[in-house]
Amino acid sequence: GMLQRPDQLDKVEQYRRREARKKASVEARLKAAIQSQLDGVRTGLSQLHNALNDVKDIQQSLIDVNKDWRQSINTIENLKDVKDAVVQHSQLAAAVENLKNIFSVPEIVRETHDLIEQGELLHAHRKLMDLECSRDNLMYEQYRMDSKNTHDMNLIHTYFGDMQKLSEELAKQLWMVVQRSLVTVRRDPTLLVSVVRIIEREEKIDRRMLDRKKQTGFIPPGRPKKWKEKMFNILERTVSTRIEGTQADTRESDKMWLVRHLEIIRKYVLDDLLVAKTLLDQCFPPHYDIFNRLLNMYHQALATRMQELAAEDLEANEIVSLLSWVLNTYNSTEMMGNSELSPEVDVNSLDALLSQNVVDQLLSKYMSTLTSNIIGWLRKALETDKKDWIKETEPEADQDGYYQTTLPAIVFQMFEQNLQVAAQINEDLKTKVLILCLQQMNSFLTRYKDEAQLYKEEHLKNRQYPQCYVQYMIAVINNCQTFKESIISLKRKYLKIEMEDTLSISHANMDATLDVIAKEGCSSLLDEVFMDLEPHLNELMTKKWLMGSNAVGTICVTVEDYFNDFARIKKPYKKTMTLEAHRRVVVEYIRAIMLKRISFKNAEERKEGAERMIKEAEQFRFLFKKLAAGSGEGTEGLCDIIEAIAEVIKLTDPSLLYLEVSTLVSKYPDIRDDHIAALLTVRGDASRDMKQTIIETLDQGPSQPNPNYVPIFKEITVPTLTVPKLLK
């Protein structure tokens, strides 16, 4: 490759010298490597030779040692006594070292006892530690010498027996301080710190003794003391006792015992936790986490106490107090949510004091008890109201002068109180209680209606009793309006808009029942009026009436007198009653005409009678316009019927009688044939054939009733001739 071109031949000598140098270099390195290998082999062989000589020397030495050991076996066995003497010397050395403490044990015990009584707990504990150290060292040496020698162990234990009593006495003092730690930390925090230091010392000694037990199997009597664990147990019992001890009253001595009990618990727990956070936490090492430990203790103690209370036979108001406290007060700013407890206390991380199952059971029991209570309260309220109905004094009037009884106020005050109580727990319970109240109200109104009917029936047996029947019946009618307004107010105040549809049917039923009660009440009052009017109504359309009887004047005076009382009826019912009274007066007047008590003999009498009817119709119109206080719509047409009938009677030309009667029938299409016959009989100048012709002709004619006309003649029956009258 180097000699491909002719000009490269000039470099042949150069190439040769370079290759010669490379070859010489490789040979030199190869020689050096071989020389190095040879030197290493030589050195290795030399070391192996030396090692072989050393092994031979060691083998000879082992042979010599083995020979010497076999010769000295008997000598070693003879040294056992020396060994025992060494162990005994070690024990005696320990005894001598603790000799001063051993002889001074009784004196140290007395001093320690005095220090405990004086409250010098740290010094007392130091001396107790010295005594325990002496005893433990002696027992440990005895254990090392002869672990099975229980006699000597018991001897040491008995000698130091008073020390155990000192330990118990000191522990008793410590636990007293721990029990009162929340008080002590305010008055003398140094004492509490001393107690914690003593407990920490004991914990260290416990750990040291347990470590030695793992190594040697020996542990002194009474160890481990576990005073830290006992301290937390004492604190836990103290917290439980503090919670349980807040119940100062029972249901028998105070109906508000539970409210008082829960309020005391709230105050105590909040105060204790604030003290624990601000003062107690500084007296304990951080790893004790004393505030959170106490918080958990209080929470567990409260949960236990709430479960105990929930298991008792609580009344309805007590169940509400308990649930309100558990569900609302506990997490509120009045207790665990207090700003001074944050951020250490997070109310969202606290477990519930009562399980949902227990809460549901309490709510179910509350609703059941409340249902029974409401039924009882409503029954009692109605019985009380019924007693008022028979009083000889008029019922009270409201600020507008309307008669009323206390029943609506009592009923809705009771509902209001229960709803306010339920609202303290949650919205769901409030809605349930409202639904319950309205359901029971529905049933109650049915009983109210029945009692009002019985009241009316009892009065009809003896109209002189009760003395204030009219006034109390007016109060019953007004109560219906008050009930309506109160129901609307209650729903508006306590029911969410989205829930209104669920109660619309129930509300409609109650309104309907109240309207029935009011309507029946108004009807019974009008019955009362017309029973008084009956003698005067019987005078209408008689010879006496035609001769100038003042029956209608008396009727108007009587009605007006009654309506002076009826003015105390609330507007919606008063207006209805005025219209009904007007209608009934007109009906009775027309009925008097149809009874055919009089038959006019001539045109003179017909004219006089007709004019009298028109005049009396005008009297009625004036009266009822006055009673309606200007809102007399719907009353004008009633008196027009009397005037229309009067025009038929007044007619002087018999040939126009058909036309006049047909006009009457077209206005009032519910007039029957017997009504026309009776009317023509009262006229006195229509023959049988004329009556028959007019009636037959009218039957064939088309009828076009006024759509606004309210039928009135259908209520009026025309008497027919009976057999005795025919014979007469």
Image (cartoon, rainbow, N blue to C red):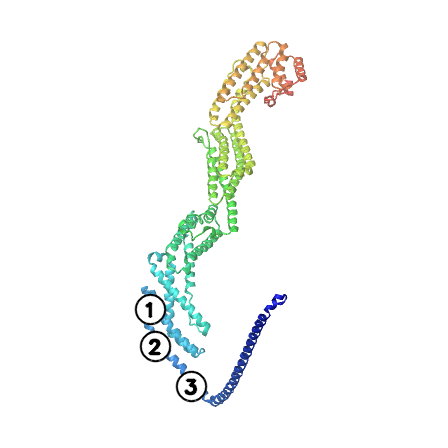
Q: Relative to residue 226, is residue 341 depicted above or below?
A: above
Mark toward the start of the polypeptide (3 vs 1): 3
- Dot 2 alpha-carbon crowd within 10 angstroms: few under 14, some 14 to 19, many 20 or more: some
Marks 3 and 1, how far apart at CA: 43 Å
Q: Of helix, strand and loop, which one carries label 2? A: helix
Q: Which residue is mark 2?
A: 99
Residues at discs 3 and 2 in contact (Cβ within 8 Å): no
Judge from the rendering whether residue 390 lies leftward or rightward of residue 180; answer left or right. Answer: right
Marks 1 and 2, how far apart at CA: 19 Å
Q: Which residue is mark 3?
A: 81
- Dot 1 alpha-carbon crowd within 10 angstroms: few under 14, some 14 to 19, many 20 or more: many
- Dot 3 alpha-carbon crowd within 10 angstroms: few under 14, some 14 to 19, many 20 or more: few
Three-letter residue code for mark 2: Leu
Q: Is residue 563 visible?
A: yes
Judge from the rendering whether residue 233 lies leftward or rightward of residue 363; answer left or right. Answer: left
Three-letter residue code for mark 1: Thr
Can you tell which of label 3 and label 2 is closer to the viewer?
Answer: 3
Three-letter residue code for mark 3: Asp
Residue 84 on image: x %, y %? 42, 83
Q: Of helix, strand and loop, which one carries label 3? A: helix
Tag of residue 112: 1
